[in-house]
Each structure stands twice: as structure tokens, then as C-alpha cells.
Image (tube, grey):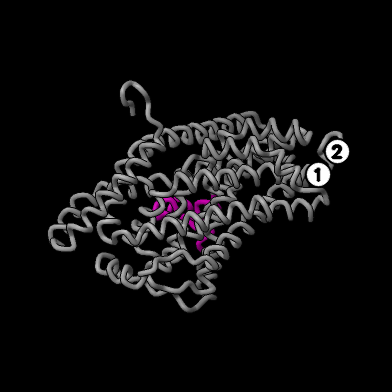
Amino acid sequence: MKLFGRKIPLIYLNLAGFILGCLAGLALYQFGLSHSAMLDKIIAVISPFGNVLVNMLKMIVIPIIFFSLVCGAATMPAKSFGKMGLGVCGWYFFTSLYAAIFGTVVAIILNPTLQSAEKMASGMMKQVESMKVASADGGNALVNLLYSLFSNPFKALAEGNFLAVIVFAILFGLAARIVLDTTKDEKVKKALETMLEVCQGCQYAIFKMIEWIMAYFPVGIFALTACSFAAYGITLFQSYLQVAGCVILGVLLMIGVCYPLMIWALCRVNPYPVVWALREPILTAFVTRSSAATLPVSLRTVEEKFRVRKELSSFTLSLGATVNMDGVCIHLPVFAVLAANMFGFDLTVTQIFLLVLSVVFASVGAGGVPGGSIFLLFLVLDAINLTAPQTATIVALALGINPLLDMVETACNVAGDNIGTFVVGKKMNMLDGK
């Protein structure tokens, strides 16, 4: 959008939509104290503009996950998926799982909620469906989860079965890469190359659709924020402060404490010079909010500062920009715990386990896209059985603060990619001159 001949960055428009939505919602809240029937009518007019944004996000999330993972898995040459491949994937899986557990623990300890949680929850329950009672049989839940991982892929795509889509996309991309690298039949090779080019083209087209959807963000954010504040008033601000504090603290601890401990434990070197050497890609990721956009800076940094061989850095960093999202793993559980507090239910041990697992799988599909974590929030909220209206409420909260959280979580993602490259290179003697 241009104003006085100058283009206004989308992040400023989103912020403006959020602030205007807050002000409009607070004004409507005060108006509704004496005219509640009229307030309901006004919210009924405004809310569809926000619900359209929620529906657009739901529309795009499955294609993002599928094509991003197929393309990401297919970039791995079959010959590289040996010791180096297992080492890199092992690091990414371990740090993602660790970050998901760490983020969940931080969220549970800090316990983001509202002082008037009971009053707010009762107000919400007048407008949303009752919570589905989670199954008390943890064994059945785990069995059902395992079954859901391996489902008919077309049925999974149609039904929005995220985990099944993720598993199939990874296996499909790896299978295509292995056949491509091992076949001697030129016709088969050409067919696979064409198929992967089509998938890449679909990914580019989806990224363009994301740009269109993000252009609607200011309108959707305004509507969602206005409706939330009109219904619940000033008490929502405490939620924003606590959620932001949880995520930022978690990311700072991950970069400043957890990663250095991992470097020291695995490589027996002073970790802080390593982390300090990565300040340029970390700051670039913070500004651009994109792991993919930071990739050239990361490649140059690890090759110049750590002397990592190109065959390792191009593999680990390209893969990491697609599948390694430690910041997302810290970010998403905070909203799940917030939802549990806001809607007045306790997370069982089984639900926490499913939450952590869902966060790890969801983070694989973030795809290095700015704001990608907001698309994956649906998967995580589904893991704790939120209804559609409840999900819309949490997404409304997330959209308002997502630009800030996206900056810090992307910095964490990129730090994890670069540190993983250093650790694997050190352990496998792939650092020239080291």
C-alpha cells in the first residue's frame, strides 16, 4: 500500500490494524456495557471480515506443508543421506524436540493467563461450543495417533489430517530423490525431474497466494482484534504481555544457554565465540523474518567464520531452512497453554505428549516463510481438541502479536541451523583447517 507516494511496509499496516482494532474494540466494549444487544449486532457485522482471514489461513496451510516438505526432502541427494544425513537430521530432530519440550515447560511454569480467567472463560462459553471431553484412555489416543500418521494421502489432504500429510510428503520427497539419484533410465529421471519442477512451481505459486493473503492481514487483524476486545475488554492486554514474555524469554534462553551447552557437550569448545560469530545471520533473520531469505548470509558466515565445507553447509542450511524451526517449537506451546487457561481446562499428560509431538511435526512444515508459524497454529490447537470458535479466538490473539514473535522465533530458527552446521562439521571433521 502506498501513502503520499511511499510504500508502507506490511508490518506497519498490521500494527496499525491491531492498534485500531484494540481502540475500536475497547470503545465497543464500553458501549456494550449499556447496549449489549446492539453490541452483538455490531460484532455480527464485523466478525465475518476476521473469519474470512481465518478461513484463508486454513485453506493454505495444507498446500504449504505438502509442497514445502516434498521440495525440501527432495533436495537431499541419496548419497548424502548416510552418516552426514543422519547426523544432520538427528540434530534437527533432537533440537526441535528439545525446543518443543522446553517451550512447553516454560509456558507451564510462567502460565500465561488472565487475572479474570474464570469471568472471561464464562463469557466466552456463551459464544462458543462446549469443549469436547478428551479421551481418558491415553493408550487409545497414542494408537489413534500412530494410525493417523499413515493414512490415505488423498483422504488426509481432503480432511486436513496434518500429521499424515507431513509423513507422506517427507517419504514421497525422499523416495523421489533416491530414485532420481539411483536410476539409470533417462525416461524415469526426466519424469521425476519434471515432477519435482512442478512441485517447486506449485510452491512458488503458493508463496504468491501467501502474499495475497498477507495483504489482507490488516483488515482481518482489525476485525478479529476489535471483536475480541469488544467482548472481553482491557483484560486482553495482560494476555499479550505474558505471551510475548514467555516466547521471548524462551528464545533468549535457547540461544544464550541451551545452544551453548549443546556446543560444549558435543564439541568441547568455548561456545560463546561460536554464537557471537553468528550475529549477522541471526540479526538478518530477526529483520527479514524468513529463514529462507537469510540462507545466503548463513552460507557465507559458516563457510568464512567456521570454514565449513560447501557440500556440508549447502546441505544442512538448505534443509534447515525448511525443516528446522526451533523458535516455532518454543512459540506454539505457549498459545496451547494460554488456550487451556482461557477456556478453563487442564492439559493431561497424554495431551501434553501429543502437544509436543504435534509441535515437532508442525514445525517441519513452516517452510521458511515469513509468518509461517501462524499457519501451523491450527495443527497445535487441534491437538488439544479446541473447537473452531475457540481456535479463532486464539488465532486472533496470535495474529495481533505475531510480527514481534515471528522476528524472535526466526532468529532462533536460524541460530539452530547454523549451530547445527558447526556441530556436525566439527564432529565429522568437515571444517577445513580446524
In the image, residue 236 lies in the stretch drawn in magenta: no
In the image, residue 158 lies in the stretch drawn in magenta: yes
Q: Is residue 50 visible?
A: no
Q: Which mark is residue 426?
A: 1
Q: Secondary structure at mark 1?
A: helix
Q: Amino acid at mark 2?
A: Lys
Question: Around disc 1, counting alpha carbons within 10 Å, would you say few (fewer than 14), some (14 to 19), or many (20 or more)?
Answer: some
Question: Around disc 2, counting alpha carbons within 10 Å, would you say few (fewer than 14), some (14 to 19), or many (20 or more)?
Answer: few
Q: Is residue 158 visible?
A: yes
Residue 195: x %, y % from top left: 53, 34
- Toward the right, the furthest residue is 433
Q: Which mark is residue 434?
A: 2
118 or 55: nearer the viewer: 118
Q: Amino acid at mark 1?
A: Lys
Q: Main secondary structure of the magenta part?
A: helix
Question: Which residues make up the magenta segment?
Answer: 148-168
Q: Are marks 1 and 2 in contact (CB under 8 Å)?
A: yes
Q: State the quadrant of the N terminus.
A: top left
